[in-house]
Image (cartoon, rainbow, N blue to C red):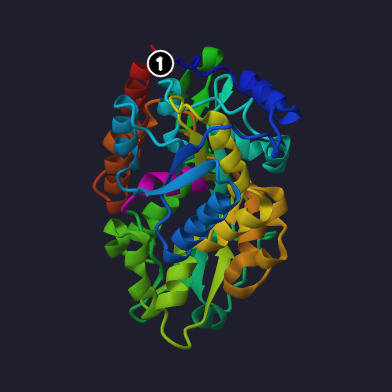
Amino acid sequence: MRVSPLRAAAVAATTLALLLSGCAGTDDDPGTDRRVELRFQSLAWQKESVEANEQLVKEWNEAHPDIQVRYVQGSWDTVHDQLLTSFEGDEAPDVIHDASDDLADFADGGYLADLRTLLTDRLTADIPRESWRTTTFGDGVYGVPFLQEPRVLIANTKLLKASGVRIPTPDRPWSWDEFRQVAKRLTGRGRYGVAWPLKEPVSVTLNLGLSAGGRLFHRGPGGKVTIRSEEGDRIVPDTLHDQIGTDRSAARTALGMGGSDTLPGFFGGKYAMVPLGFSYRQQIVEQAPEGFDWTVLPAPAGRGGAVQGVSPQTLSVAAASPHKKEAARFIDFLLRPPNMVRLAKGDWMLPTGTAALADPALHTDRHGWATGVAVARGLRPAPAQSVRGYPEWKDKIATPALQEYYSGAIDAEELRRRLVDDGNRVLARYQR
């Protein structure tokens, strides 16, 4: 079955309202009389996360001898192509771990089950509407968003205090202008104020752009999406561009780095701050030299407020699974509040569920957990969340264009032409 094309925002909102007002199914639905085996493909990769997932599978299997779950290890690096191959070969796992920004084409292709009649009232009510929007495509819901990762600033506490700058809080973050001035003040004596890891520049540019009032992707009549570059869309890329090329407060060498690549320089005092995903705190805890003092700060914000885009991790059910109800029951078990907290702590991320997010274990200043929980109030669906053709635009158009802009190889007008003009030609092929 193919899913209806994406409709206008009003239709999506109505669908979501219906979803959250009542869904079929309860946690204690009876199982089947036959023994069922489900395959659960997990993308957990950190040791604590893998252990948490495997332990929860073990607990489920012990409590449900008639519905056994087999844990299958997947990889973030290859998941899209691997899933596409498994869907086309009718070999997809029953329960699928992925990210919400990877679901649109799979939902449109009819590969994922619509979960509206499969989820329990408890689960649908526990996860906020903003999170459900990330997995709502057309008239259906094709994944359960359960883990989310904001971007934060990790700062060298000693250097930050010595600089005399104002310390930002989630309620009063730095503006983008203030952040630029702070980075300049922290620069000197062989040290850069900030190192932006820009090997994958698209998501950081778009998601942080929401705080500056940027959107880039705009949905019009009939659900058609077009790209426009407006004032708010230019603040984040221009700030990064100027920090690297004009202020010299951002390390040019970080242009080709991933997040982990910046950590040795951060520990060595070469960079005063590094903007990273929230989960990188685990690597910092494990790798930082003894006595190294660091702190978690909220990302800068502009006229859009202290918001940023996010693409949560999700759990979906394959449309071809013969055991959809059992798969949904297993998902409900995994995402009970105490279990969601275990999964979040294992991945050093934040749960989407309101009950899990309120757990005292996450409201601690240690390792910046409390800052992350506060930042979670401003998380919104990533701008390109449900845009068909986004992966091609990102890989073929936006990534090389942003890399060249940040390096100084092209100017702002050429960046706009590529993102907008070339980008709209890509999207048009998916919206005929």
- Image quadrant where residue 421 sits: top left
Query: Residue 219, how many percent across, how many down?
Result: 53, 22
Q: Which residue is mark 1?
A: 431
Query: Residue 405, how many percent across, how many down?
Result: 31, 46
Instruction: Name the residue rendered at 67%, 52% in the picture.
Output: 337
The amino acid on which the numbered mark 1 sits, given as a three-letter code, is Gln
Instruction: Name the residue rendered at 57%, 42% in the picture.
Output: 330
Give yes or no for residue 203 being in the magenta stretch: yes
In the displayed structure image, the side of residue 248 where residue 147 appears, left or right? right
Looking at the image, residue 36 lies above or below residue 252: above
Looking at the image, residue 415 lies above or below residue 335: above
Looking at the image, residue 268 lies above or below residue 36: below
Instruction: Name the residue rendered at 61%, 74% in the picture.
Output: 366
Q: Is residue 126 visible?
A: yes
Check disc 1: other Cα within 10 Å, few if <14, some if 14-19, many if 20+.
Answer: some
> Which residue is most to the left?
409
Magenta segment main secondary structure? helix
Query: Residue 307, how many percent across, how many down?
Result: 61, 47
Instruction: Name the residue rendered at 42%, 65% in the picture.
Output: 47
> Which residue is most to the right?
21
Image quarter hosting the C terminus:
top left
Magenta stretch bounds: 199-209
As rendered, which of 206 and 338 lies closer to the eye? 338
Give yes or no for residue 144 being in the magenta stretch: no
Image quarter hosting the N terminus:
top left
Dot 1 falls on a residue whose secondary structure is loop
In the displayed structure image, the side of residue 185 where residue 306 appears, left or right? right
Query: Residue 6, how many percent across, how many down?
Result: 51, 19
In the displayed structure image, the side of residue 71 where residue 331 appears, left or right? right
